[in-house]
């Protein structure tokens, strides 16, 4: 049977574009459909604009610290429209690069929504049908509102980058990556930030000691964090929103940002109709090779709700091409993925938290929390944390947790050692780089506790 294409990719984000490009470079005929902007969540409304906002938000403190170091300059003020204009120009540039990658590799693109009509047929929004030997679903995810009275008055992370002006005050609901990162960003930009999280500590699932320090430092930086608290209902109040909370309070905020999770984009794709297995959140169920229950259909990235991170989607896309077009079955390795949370202070982590590790085997914990030289000299009380969780039986470092400026950069490198199976003694054999914060990772002599 002949097909229009060897591969039809639905979704032009990180995973879809990488798979399309690498497959096209193998000489196969590839098409890709994208209904929105190329680059997907990461480039258009996620990692990239978020990180640029983190940079923007850090200058206020840096300015204050510079004075402590002897610099003098006039009043510093943040101009949101100036920054937002530059931000969107940069996103336009990046989107152009993504489009160009596809065009220069001979991938046929369709700027419209697509759905599956049968296991080998894609139907585009204009009614055109295209057949393909393989179909790859890479449609990503989107933020969801929690479904409480008045929540339509709130915004999500997608909207933050488009605000006409920065609000005077904001309530951020949630305690995950997105809520905690935006709390730091908006606080740094001068917005009065309140954060409600329903659980006992933000960043659930990460090492307790590390997330405890992040939360403490966020509070010290001026964020008003309320734990064990969430929204009951919301009402319009002039230009703002009146919020009734579970802690019995009623307060007015200029804006409310819901960062209460994301769901996979599978609505209206025709997947269930084809008998493709979906999970409880609507995620596409795949095997280790990203294959769905219909053999000609694969799925990668956030739409599968495995590990929702850009580099993981990219890996999944490449493993898919390796498996399907290079005849080399390659499962995706989801073990020991280093990751950073761009809170202020940043957190970098790889491997098991202390709590997870001690459920599995006896461990030693090496940990040091201290005031780093740079901010301490400027008169700040900021603390950082360096922590290793070590197996007592094998001496392997099972987990490494860093809370510090630049923790994302540090954990990328520590992640190599942990992925290679380095022991505590391997860390200790490495000479310290002095004076740095991360030298603590190779100089912690005695465990602070065993468990
Ligand atoms: P998360 O699932 O990480 O966090 C959602 C938060 O909202 C949790 O604190 C959750 O509480 C809370 N919540 C969920 N439902 C409700 C509700 N009905 N009422 C009140 N609170 C609620 O989602 P995010 O949106 O923050 O991030 C999504 C994913 O995106 C992350 O898991 C991550 O994979 C990725 N990401 C990665 C980044 C990075 O690498 N730096 C940055 C941003 C996102 P509870 O803990 O109790 O469930």
Image (cartoon, grey):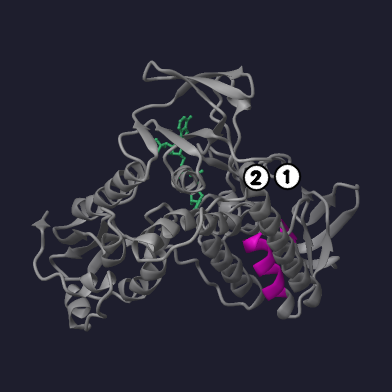
The x and y percentages for residue 172 are 49, 35
Q: Residue at x 71, y 55 (%)?
A: 85
Of 95 and 223, nearer the camera is 223
Q: Is 343 left, or right, of 403 in this rendering?
A: right
The x and y percentages for residue 342 are 44, 55
Structural crowding at the residue carrying mark 1, measured as other residues with C-alpha within 10 Å and reported as few (<14), some (14–19) or many (≥20)? some
Q: Is 64 left, or right, of 241 in this rendering?
A: left
Residue interval drawn in magenta: 9-23
C-alpha gap between disc 1 and disc 2: 9 Å
Q: Is 62 left, or right, of 37 in this rendering?
A: left
Does the rendering let one see residue 137? Answer: no
Q: Quadrant of residue 64?
A: bottom left
* 91 within the magenta span: no
Circles 1, 2 touching at the beta carbon (< 8 Å): yes
Total labels drawn: 2
Label 1 sits on a secondary structure element that is loop
Label 2 sits on a secondary structure element that is loop
The x and y percentages for residue 322 are 60, 74
* 19 within the magenta span: yes
Q: Which residue is mark 2?
A: 265
**Image disc number at residue 90:** none
Q: Quadrant of the N terminus?
A: bottom right
Q: Which residue is mark 1?
A: 269
Structural crowding at the residue carrying mark 2, measured as other residues with C-alpha within 10 Å and reported as few (<14), some (14–19) or many (≥20)? many
Q: Residue at x 59, y 48 (%)?
A: 284
Of 86 and 77, nearer the camera is 77
Q: Is residue 321 above or below residue 380?
A: below
Q: Is residue 37 above or below residue 263?
A: below
């Amino acid at each position: 049977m002949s097909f229009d294409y060897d591969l039809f990719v639905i979704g032009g984000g990180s995973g879809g574009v990488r798979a399309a490009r690498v497959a096209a470079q193998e000489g196969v005929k590839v098409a890709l459909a994208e209904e929105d902007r190329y680059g997907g969540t990461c480039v258009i409304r996620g990692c990239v604009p978020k990180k640029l906002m983190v940079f923007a938000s850090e200058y206020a403190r840096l300015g204050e610290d510079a004075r402590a170091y002897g610099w003098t300059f006039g009043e510093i003020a943040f101009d949101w429209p100036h920054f937002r204009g530059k931000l969107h120009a940069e996103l336009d540039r990046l989107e152009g690069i993504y489009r160009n990658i596809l065009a220069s590799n001979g991938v046929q693109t369709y700027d419209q929504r697509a759905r599956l009509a049968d296991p080998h047929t894609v139907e585009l929004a204009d009614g055109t049908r295209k057949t393909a030997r393989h179909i790859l679903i890479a449609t990503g995810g989107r933020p969801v509102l929690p479904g409480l009275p008045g929540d339509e008055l709130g915004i999500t992370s997608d909207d933050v980058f488009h605000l006409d002006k920065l609000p005077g005050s904001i309530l951020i609901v949630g305690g995950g990556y997105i809520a905690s990162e935006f709390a730091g960003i908006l606080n740094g930009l001068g917005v009065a930030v309140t954060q409600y999280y329903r659980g006992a500590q933000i960043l659930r699932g990460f090492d307790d000691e590390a997330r405890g320090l992040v939360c403490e430092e966020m509070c010290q930086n001026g964020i008003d964090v309320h734990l064990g608290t969430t929204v009951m209902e919301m009402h319009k109040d002039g230009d703002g929103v009146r919020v009734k909370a579970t802690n019995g309070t009623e307060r007015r905020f200029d804006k409310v940002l819901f960062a209460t999770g994301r769901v996979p984009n599978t609505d209206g794709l025709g997947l269930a109709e084809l008998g493709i297995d979906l999970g409880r959140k609507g995620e596409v169920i795949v095997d280790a090779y990203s294959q769905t229950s219909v053999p000609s259909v694969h799925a990668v990235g956030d739409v599968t709700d495995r590990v929702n991170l850009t580099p993981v989607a990219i890996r999944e896309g490449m493993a898919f091409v390796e498996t399907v077009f290079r005849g080399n079955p390659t499962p995706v390795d989801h073990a020991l993925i280093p990751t950073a949370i761009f809170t202020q202070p940043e957190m970098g982590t790889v491997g098991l938290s202390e709590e997870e590790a001690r459920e599995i085997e006896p461990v030693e914990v090496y940990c040091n929390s201290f005031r780093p030289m740079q901010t301490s000299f400027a008169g700040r009380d900021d603390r950082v944390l360096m922590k290793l969780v070590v197996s007592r039986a094998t001496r392997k470092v099972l987990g490494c947790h860093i809370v510090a400026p630049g923790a994302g950069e540090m954990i990328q490198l520590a992640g190599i050692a942990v992925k290679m199976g380095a022991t505590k003694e391997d860390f200790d054999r490495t000479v310290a780089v002095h004076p740095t914060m991360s030298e603590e990772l190779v100089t912690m002599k005695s465990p602070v506790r065993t468990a």
